[in-house]
Amino acid sequence: LHIQAIKQKHGSYSAEWSSDQLWTRKKYANSNCRWECKMKFDVMNGCWPAFWLMGDNFTGAGVEAGQGGLEWPACGELDIMEFMGGANGNLSSAVHWANILSDTEHQSKSLGTYTDKITGEITDWHIYGCEITDTQITFDVDGTVYKTLNISEMDADFGNAFKMPMYPLISLQVGQSGGTPDTDASEMNVYVDWVRCYAPVGTTVYRCRKYANNWIDYRDINRCKTSRKCSVYSSSIKK
């Protein structure tokens, strides 16, 4: 996969740069698993590449908005890798969630930078990983663990977003946390060799029959994770 941002306006948008992102929402998601991405990217002012996860029950944004489910950040977000700060920037990770079903209750935890954990150059190929279990979330790069979180820290009154299926995204944004692009820059690049998901055999989740876009954790099917308390579940799905 090659994502290239180019200095070119798109349609009626006022932004000077055009870029893209790839995700598998409503096509592939998983829980209680390990995610990995082997990728490399340009290090330059304005370049903001990322590999991250979002809850598959996200309501959607833009043309996909209003599909039912949970809004951000209640759906949960795991930023496995973000390179921010421009040419002299750093690799970092973060977690976003909500304690109640409201955008105003945004909770986040910055996991700091881990540029010093890699071998070689930042622009080389590296494997960025995240493993989610019943009890913890572990972040690593090239097999070196740099942060572990107790998953119960993100418990909410409607459940825990990080025990639900999540889907991967790979993005290349320009500006904002990537800084201001140099005036002579014309393109920025992200290259992906592969994205992999490893899950235990027999992992099971349940889909709510009444609210079809909401997932019920197979470890706690007696509690509706949307706080609607309908207690109506469809048959289980083996992943």
Image (spheres, rainbow, N blue to C red):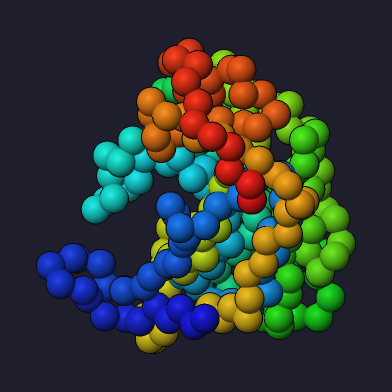
* Depth check, front residue: 168 or 18: 168
* Residue at the image point whose x is 55% and y is 63% from the top: 50
> Is 210 left or right of 46, judged from the image as shown?
left
> Is 65 left or right of 148, judged from the image as shown?
left
> Is 24 left or right of 126, judged from the image as shown?
left
Give the answer, above or below, for where 209 lies relative to 168: above
Farthest front residue?
A: 235
> Is 7 left or right of 189, judged from the image as shown?
left
Q: Position of residue 128 (x, y in %)?
A: 71, 65
* Residue at the image point whose x is 68% and y is 61% from the top: 197
* Depth check, front residue: 51 or 49: 51
Give the answer, above or below, for where 184 lies relative to 114: below
Q: Position of residue 49 (x, y in %)?
A: 53, 67
Quadrant of the rendered image containing residue 204: top right
Q: Position of residue 96 (x, y in %)?
A: 57, 38
Farthest top residue?
A: 229
Would you say residue 131 is visible in this rendering?
A: no
* Residue at the image point whose x is 64% and y is 60% from the top: 81
Would you say residue 142 is visible in this rendering?
A: yes
Farthest left residue?
A: 12
* Depth check, front residue: 151 or 10: 151
* Residue at the image point whose x is 81% and y is 69% from the top: 142
* Depth check, front residue: 51 or 158: 158
Q: Position of residue 187 (x, y in %)?
A: 41, 84
* Number of numbered discs overlaid on the protein picture: 0
Give the answer, above or below, for where 33 lies relative to 226: below
